[in-house]
Image (cartoon, rainbow, N blue to C red):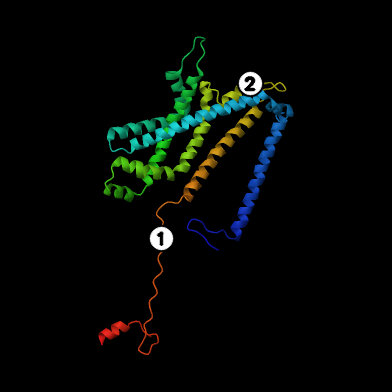
Amino acid sequence: MSSSVLYDVPGPKARMRNRLYTALGSLALAALLAFVVYRLDAKNQLDPDVWNIFNNAGVRTNIRDGVLTTLKVFAVAGALSLALGLLLAVGRLSEHRPVRWLATGFIELFRAVPLLITIYALWVLFLTYKNDLGVIGDSTAFWGLVIGLTIYNGSVQAEIFRAGVNAVPRGQVEAAYALGMRKHQVMTMLLLPQATRSMLPTVISQLVVTLKDTSLGYVITYTELLFATRTMANNIIVNGENPFTAVTIVVGAIYIAMCLALSSLATWIERRGRRAKTGVVVAAAAEPAEQPEVLDAVGGPSQHTGGDADRAGK
């Protein structure tokens, strides 16, 4: 029976206790699910007519368009937040005091302000316009959501990259300076690659948060997945009620699927990075050459290896 420093192999009583806790937890979860199903059935939310709306081509098209707009916002905001995070991390690590103070103030400010307020303020103060019909343009809502997500998540990504840079052993930095490398070379060729690789799971986790935060676009009436499906549910009547529950369950499942896909991508990238062959391959050591046998005066093999030394002594 083996154990590690951080974990002791449980004994018979601990294993029995763990099985008991697992069984009780499973029963509690099953009871909760049964209660949820019972309440949904009591509210007539499991009626086939309610779920039959998803067989309508218009409903499926609406959901598809919402998913595409959500992914579009996420792709742009995710890429821009990574670029902004790298820039802010380098600025906060700068030796120039004004640059460091400016980057630190930007990061702390937008990490403290709620993202919903940031998105709404950007949209109202800078990006809102009306056309000749008095209708607010949808493109401004897109950029309001993208810029808000970029500013907030870029500030968080900057702290992630800074933590990764500070985790690199100081001896590597000193060795790089001893070799004559300049500071920008040390940062771009030594620190940032290692920081990005070591903090990749955390970076992807923050991108998952970015994907979920795209649902805040409803506050500026951007037609992402949540806003599009909620508007659709408002316009559908089934058995005298709007099918909000069914639509919410489907939309929640779509968000879960997208987040799981992104997390699986992060796991695949991390495993691929671990399997990557790095470093210099060391050649196998050569086998020692065979020593010739030393013959004695009779012609047989010598019984000692120091014959030359003995003769020299004589």
Give the residue number, with chain letter if any, for mark 2: 234
Q: Is residue 108 above or below residue 182?
A: above
Which numbered marker is on residue 155? none
Name the side, left or right, on which 282 lies relative to 171. right
Q: Amino acid at mark 2?
A: Asn
The outermost residue toward the top is 132
Query: Which percent across, then down, holds residue 34?
Result: 69, 39
Single out the mark in the foreground, 1 or 2: 1
The front one of 84 and 48 is 84
Q: Residues within 10 Å of mark 2 (few under 14, many from 20)?
A: few
Name the side, left or right, on which 161 lies relative to 1. left
Give the residue drawn at x 35%, y 49%: 169
Give the residue drawn at x 26%, y 84%: 312
Q: Earlier in the sequence, mark 1 or mark 2?
A: 2
Query: Which percent across, then down, holds residue 206?
Result: 48, 37
Give the residue drawn at x 38%, y 40%: 162
Q: Secondary structure at mark 1?
A: loop
Give the residue number, with chain letter if any, for mark 1: 283
Q: Secondary structure at mark 2?
A: helix
The front one of 269 and 18 is 269
The front one of 86 and 189 is 189
Q: Residues within 10 Å of mark 1 (few under 14, many from 20)?
A: few
Q: Quadrant of the N terminus?
A: bottom right
Query: Which percent across, then down, holds residue 272?
Result: 49, 47
Query: Which percent across, then down, holds residue 246?
Result: 66, 29
The outermost residue toward the bottom is 298
Q: Amino acid at mark 1?
A: Ala
How far is mark 1 from mark 2, CA to CA? 71 Å
Asked if labels 2 and 1 touch by Cβ distance under 8 angstroms, the answer is no
Name the side, left or right, on which 30 lies relative to 280. right
